[in-house]
Amino acid sequence: MNTRALLKQTILSALLLIFSGFIGVDGAEAAGLSESEFVDVKSVAPTILVELRYATSNNFIRRPLYRADMPAMVRLSVARRLAVAQKFLEKRGYGLKIWDAYRPKAAQVQLWKAIGNHAYVADPKDIGSMHTRGAAVDVTLVDGSGREVPMPTEFDNFTPAAMIDYQGRSPVVRSNLKMLQKAMAHGGFYGLRTEWWHFCAADWTTYQPVPELQLLVRAPEPGS
């Protein structure tokens, strides 16, 4: 890419961040943001892929819970850790895809109503979700071309097959899961026993839940 094209791309990226109301890492540092401030993951680690399942109908509820343009938001310190995990994977020909990041409380309430099982969804009336604190992500592994690789299950599979300790027979799946776990551990995350895709920052309890970020959640449908 030549200098003119690179400059044009940089300016366009900056404008998109400004218009969407979010700020990148460099801007965050210039503005004096702390490690606990929320940022768009892509502004810290632009090569991480994002496919927020709850911004689509491709989830177990079969309808969007987020606005279609919702970015993957996490605390700045969490975004930096994701960048470390991504670099670890890229050296090995892989990468991350984010299925969920920050989750507004209104969405958490709807998930709890749909499942009502502490093994899979945190009760918003109790300690709340790590996602609502901006300290957890749901991720999967992709290859160098951005294609998802075989993993134990699909997203939001509420069966024993989704346990973090894979018990299946496929050595490929086992290898892929171990690669993801090593990368996330390298970045300072640990997993959830019942969901192989869920990882939280080791210090997640230091962050308070944030019910809503700039109306990023869809209003519940009538009767929901």
Image (cartoon, helix red, strand yellow):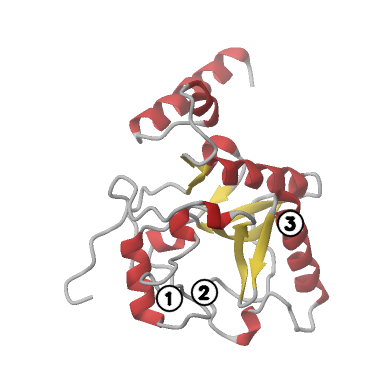
| Sooner in the amino-acid sequence: mark 3 or mark 1 | 1
213 relative to 117, above or below: above
Where in the figure is residue 66, as x and y percent of width and height? 34, 58
Instruction: Measuring from the top left, give residue 77's x and y in whole percent.
Output: 58, 42
Q: Which residue is mark 2?
A: 156
Residue 64 horizontal side relative to residue 2, left or right: left
For marks 2 and 3, the one nearer the N-term is 2
C-beta proximity under 8 Å, tags 2 and 3? no
* Front: mark 3 or 1: 3
Which of pointers 2 and 3 indicates the residue nearer the eye? 3
Number of marks in the rendered image: 3
Residue type at mark 1: give it: Phe
Q: Could you say where residue 106 lies in the image, as x and y percent from the top left?
A: 31, 63
Q: Is residue 168 above or below residue 175?
A: below
Q: Which residue is mark 3?
A: 185
Residue type highlighted by circle 2: Asp
Tell me the SS state at disc 2.
Answer: loop
Q: Quadrant of residue 138?
A: bottom right
Q: Residue shown at 69%/69% (left/top)? A: 150
Q: Which mark is residue 60?
A: 1
Q: Quadrant of residue 57?
A: bottom left
Query: In the image as oriented, which residue stretches furthest toward the front?
Result: 206
Image quarter hosting the C terminus? bottom left
Q: Residue at x 18, y 77 (%)?
A: 223
Q: Which amino acid lies under the numbered mark 3 shown in the image of this protein? A: Ala
Q: Is residue 6 visible?
A: yes
**148 sits left or right of 103 in the view:** right
Which residue is found at the position 16% from the left and 72% from the top? 222
Residue occupying the point 43% across, 58% down: 132
| Residue 100 spot, x, y in % from top left | 49, 59
* Disc on the earlier residue, 1 or 2: 1
Q: Confirm or deny contact between disc 1 and disc 2 (CB under 8 A).
A: yes
